[in-house]
Image: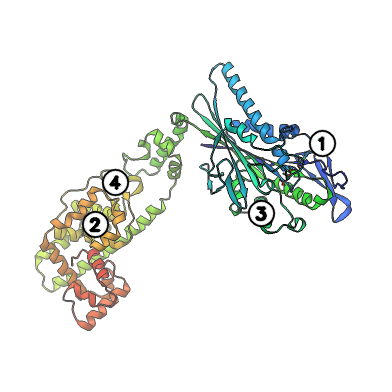
Amino acid sequence: MEKRSSATKVKVVVRLRPSLSPSENTCVNVVGNRVQILNHRNVEESLQYEFNTVFDEKSSQAQVFSTSVEPMLEKVLHGQNVSVFAYGPTGAGKTHTMLGMTSDPGIIPRVIQSLFEAIDKKQASALTGSTNQAPQFKVTFSYMEIYNEKVHDLLASGHQDLPIREDASKNIFVADLSEKSIDKYETFMNQFEPAASNRTVAATKLNKYSSRSHTILLLKICRREPDGKELRGKLYLIDLAGSEDNRRTGNKGIRLKESGAINKSLFVLGEVVDAINQNQPRIPYRNSKLTRLLQDSIGGGCHAVMITNIAPEERFYYDTYCTLNFATKSKKIVNTITTHVVRPPSIEKPTATVRPLKRRSASLQSAKPRLPKSSNSLSSLPAAELHSSSSSAATVSNDPLPSPLVRQQKAFESAIQEKLSAMEKLVENLRTTANANDVSASDHKPLTASKTSTPASKGTRKSLRLSLVSVQSDDSPDVIFPTPKASKGKLTDATNLLKQRYFGPPRQKVKKQKIQYRVVEDSTSCSPLFPQSPAVSRKRASSQDFESPTTKKIKAAPQIFNNGDQAKRNAEFLELLNSATVKELQELQTVGVKRAKMIYEWRELHGSFTSTQSLLEVPGFSDKVLKKLLRSNFVTV
Ligand SMILES: Nc1ncnc2c1ncn2[C@@H]1O[C@H](COP(=O)(O)OP(=O)(O)OP(=O)(O)O)[C@@H](O)[C@H]1O
């Protein structure tokens, strides 16, 4: 569970390191929380940059930590994520600030120490309080490096490239790293050689690429309250690689490649910041591993502190100028802080939360008064289920529009109704013609019945109509399947009449039906009353997997129907083929204008069809097409 709280800007601080070569000219001045540098376009002017805090060359490690980082620790202990990253040109003091030396530790060792002090304090104060129950804390860490656009786990043996994946919280990208319990931290830290004043010596055993890679120490803190609630915070401590001007450093070969990779990720970082500031719809986080990892810190749900390191020497002028401009852009970025809370299931369903959902489902029922009450309506669901699927409940609530699936189904259904109605008319016309040609009186009976549909036929029609698009079972569909107009008798279902006429009245009225939607691929698959050819069965195997036993039974039904009735039906169909006009032929299932014309023209040229198989001689009729036509018009081969 996540809670979104206040929007917070990225906190940008600047740290100026002391000059390392006193003989060299400097070009940076710090005045209060402003940094001044010469204007390279006009040397008589100076450029001024203002930041949250600016640390001058005399500032101590302790000062930087207590002002910029220490206040953030409390947030991590309360389930929020914090990212502290050092940015700046090569040699400006990033590693010194983040790691420091044994004699003068930087942010990382200070964070570890303070974190445990804070945890101890919290537990002690909880135990002295009235509840006498202290929260439990679990701290783990992982350490990684992005080098040449590859992520390495620095705690694992060997340097394998790791993929970056999306965290369950959806807004954090993490590499699959080995995690160590924090009690291993001492051993881990001891592997660092003390950083000396010479930066080449500052390279460590663990991080041999030191200044040429981005290193990330991730601390995960899980706080479990006595009531079972968990607060999960993460703290990213990032030492970014410095960008290098290849012309100035004369980088070649591997160095050039390294430098290119560093520049690429820092370049993308700049693009990301620009995109956020310009409110662009797409932020190019995915364009580099670094920006994917920093996604939560820049424009995400994290508290972010950017420590901008700058060097005072004149030879760093251009780097300093660019760095200060980037820092200025970054301070405009706003993050919306997320608190990561995980509650135990038992306290997930307070009545206060469930009640509005119940009201919502009640209003849903009142909005559709004509629909029959059903045992599977939302209100009858257990409260816990409603709560656990609150998002889906919210989707249903008060929405007057049916879902696209229901709309699609309705459209399909009305198309089928039209076809059936037209087919009935067609049959009726044929009968009328047959009457005129002295057809026996007994044949009129079903046609007379067709004009006033009996309750039995209504029931059968309903069952037939539902079976066109659904799988039947024991409960009524209510909400998702409103009764269509056809059931009120406005449309007459010819297919149903045919079925009654040739196969007798339905054996059993379907009492209640519950719709379980399945994909209907085309209108020709609509009849579950006739068996499908093996080929079609194979094609539809996947959708049949979802069929209920009831549907399977219905599909098997034709086997028990009277063969004589089917023969009559086939003869009637043949009669229709031999006498219908183009327009009338079009009324048949799967016959459009083109096919109707083809059938008509073939008949004009060759005379009557002697069997339905003769249709194979009509251009455009393959075996498959014919089977489809016959099946969907309830004719057997
Ligand atoms: N505030 C400071 N006080 C004293 N020395 C410093 C300070 N900042 C940096 N230094 C020294 O400057 C040198 C360069 O610093 P550092 O290695 O931290 O730079 P960097 O920005 O991490 O460089 P790179 O990007 O190459 O890793 C180091 O020898 C470091 O000890």
Gap between marks 2 and 1 measured at Cα:
86 Å
Residue wearing tag 3: 258
Q: Earlier in the sequence, mark 3 or mark 4?
A: 3
Are there few (<14), some (14-19), or many (20+) residues within 10 Å of tag 2? many
As drawn, 452 above or below 386: below
- Residue type at mark 3 is Glu
Q: Earlier in the sequence, mark 3 or mark 1?
A: 1
Residue wearing tag 4: 514
As drawn, 14 above or below 464: above
503 sits left or right of 602 in the view: left
Q: Are marks 2 and 4 in contact (CB under 8 Å)?
A: no
Per the rendering, the mark at residue 96 is: none
Label 2 secondary element: loop
Q: Earlier in the sequence, mark 2 or mark 4?
A: 4
Gap between marks 3 and 1 measured at Cα:
33 Å
User: Residue 567 versus residue 459: which sits nearer the camera?
Assistant: 567
Residue wearing tag 2: 528
Q: Residue at x 33, y 60 (%)?
A: 521
Q: Ligand 1 is in which quadrant of the figure?
A: top right
Per the rendering, the mark at residue 58 is: 1
User: Residue 402 versus residue 548: which sits nearer the camera?
Assistant: 548
- Residue type at mark 2 is Pro
Label 1 secondary element: loop
Gap between marks 3 and 4 measured at Cα:
64 Å
Gap between marks 4 and 1 measured at Cα:
77 Å
